[in-house]
Amino acid sequence: MKKLQILALATAMFAMSACGEKTDVVESGTYSGTIQEVEADKSEIYVKTDDGKVLELYFTDSTSLTQNAETVAFDQLAEGKKVEVEVEKVGNRLDPKAVRILE
């Protein structure tokens, strides 16, 4: 039992340090912010919200990505772009339902 707890703790610590910064879990809702990092090979982005939280978002097959009400490809995301994200909190994970590029 103790080995399992140590393994779980080590796994959690590794996952939190994977991008080199602390990420936050927020309630389900819509947030505005700026993309800090894009990891295309993982379909993942990090968004710093206007209130200073950092959201780690892994795109799923159901995540919509739009700009000017048009569907766009993931490669349109880049560091520094302003976005609005609609997320659903699932445990300690945030599932992005919709990402809208604002600029």
Image (cartoon, rainbow, N blue to C red):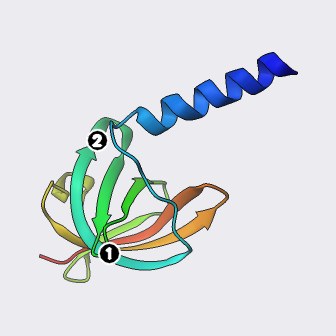
Please state the horizontal and vertical placement of residue 81, each as a whole percent of the image.
14, 65
Please state the horizontal and vertical placement of residue 55, each as a whole percent of the image.
40, 59
Q: Are circles 1 and 2 on residues that touch, CB within 8 Å?
A: no
Query: Between tags 1 and 2, which lies in front?
Result: 1
Up-down: is 37 above or below 89? above
Pick the residue in front: 83 or 60: 83
Please state the horizontal and vertical placement of residue 37, each as a whole percent of the image.
23, 48
Asked whether residue 71 appears in the rendered view, the answer is no
Pick the residue in front: 7 or 93: 7
Mark 1 is on which residue type?
Asp
Please state the horizontal and vertical placement of residue 89, each as a whole percent of the image.
59, 66
The N terminus - image quarter: top right
Kindly identify which residue carries mark 2: 39
Disc 1 from disc 2: Cα separation: 23 Å
* Image quadrant where residue 39 sits: top left
Mark 2 is on which residue type?
Glu
Image-based side of 34 in relation to 89, left or right: left
Assign a secondary structure to mark 1. loop
Q: Mark 1 packing: few (<14 Cα in 10 Å), some, or many (20+)?
A: few
Q: Mark 2 packing: few (<14 Cα in 10 Å), some, or many (20+)?
A: few
Assign a secondary structure to mark 2. strand
Q: Report the residue that reaches farthest toward the right.
A: 1
The C terminus - image quarter: bottom left
Pick the residue in front: 45 or 7: 7
Up-down: is 100 above or below 12? below
Residue visible at 50% across and 34% down in the picture: 15
Kindly identify which residue carries mark 1: 51
Residue visible at 42% across and 55% down in the picture: 57
Residue visible at 61% across and 55% down in the picture: 92
Q: Which mark is residue 6?
A: none
